Each structure stands twice: as structure tokens, then as C-alpha cells.
């Protein structure tokens, strides 16, 4: 299931952003998923929730997944603390 690999990649990106900005917590992430990206949104969402529960930096954060007409998976907005 490639959705879990994508979720791992997103989680790693969130951890990297927190580290780069000297933040201890990721509070929110908005992710755009294109309808033509070949991603099963429910599976991706499940994988993201599993991954964020594994780290103190991301545990409890809110993730909003927005489907669009594109072809990509894009981290659109992040809130850090």
C-alpha cells in the first residue's frame, strides 16, 4: 500500500519542519490530494493518523486533507509551536 509510504514521507517532512524552525510541536497540517494522484484518501488518512500518534512532536495534531482536481500530494499549510 503506497499510501502508508506517502504518510511516512509526510510525517518525516513535518518533523523536519519542526526541527528546522526550532519548534517542539506540530499543531496542524493542511494537505491537498489530487483526485488524479492515484491515492486512496481513506488509506492515506489512516496512515497519517498512525504516524502522527508515534511522535511527541506530532501527537494530537489536526490534519485536514482536501481533495482537489490536481495530480499531486501537497503539504499546503503547517502550524508549529
Image (tube, grey):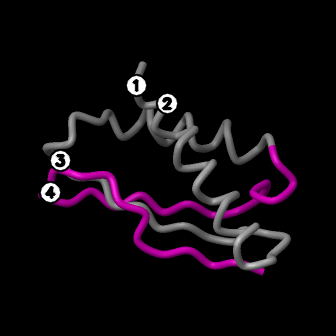
Front in this rendered view, residue 43 or 78: 78
Choose the circle earlier in sequence order: 1 or 3: 1
In the depicted view, which residue is nearer to us: 35 or 7?
Answer: 7
**Between discs 2 and 3, the one toward the N terminus:** 2
Does the magenta portion include 79? yes
Quadrant containing the C terminus is bottom right
* Distance CA(mark 4)–CA(mark 1): 18 Å
Q: Nearer the viewer, residue 45 or 1?
A: 1
Q: Within 10 Å of the Cα at label 2, are there few (<14), some (14-19), or many (20+) other Cα atoms?
A: few
At which x and y percent is residue 67? Answer: 27, 56
Q: Give the quadrant of residue 43.
A: top left
Give the residue at x 57% y 43%: 48
Q: Which mark is first along the chain, 2 or 4?
A: 2
**Residue 2: assigned label:** 1
Tell me the mark number nearer the camera, choosing from 3 and 4.
4
Name the residue beneath numbered marker 4: 70
46 left or right of 27 in image:
left
Label 4 and label 2: CA atoms lie apart by: 20 Å
Residue at (80% x, 77% y) in the render: 22
The numbered disc on residue 5 is 2
Q: Position of residue 3 (x, y in %)?
A: 42, 31
Q: Residues within 10 Å of mark 1 (few under 14, many from 20)?
A: few
Q: Which residues are magenta?
A: 55-81
For mark 4, does the 10 Å Cα neighbourhood hold few (<14), some (14 to 19), or many (20 or more) residues?
A: few
Distance in Å between CA atoms under marks 2 and 1: 5 Å
Amino acid at each position: 500500500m503506497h499510501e502508508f509510504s506517502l504518510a511516512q514521507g509526510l510525517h518525516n517532512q513535518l518533523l523536519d519542519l519542526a526541527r528546522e524552525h526550532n519548534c517542539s510541536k506540530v499543531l496542524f497540517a493542511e494537505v491537498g490530494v489530487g483526485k488524479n494522484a492515484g491515492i486512496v484518501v481513506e488509506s492515506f488518512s489512516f496512515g497519517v493518523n498512525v504516524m502522527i500518534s508515534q511522535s511527541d512532536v506530532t501527537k494530537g495534531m489536526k490534519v485536514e486533507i482536501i481533495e482537489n482536481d490536481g495530480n499531486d500530494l501537497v503539504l499546503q499549510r503547517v502550524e508549529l509551536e
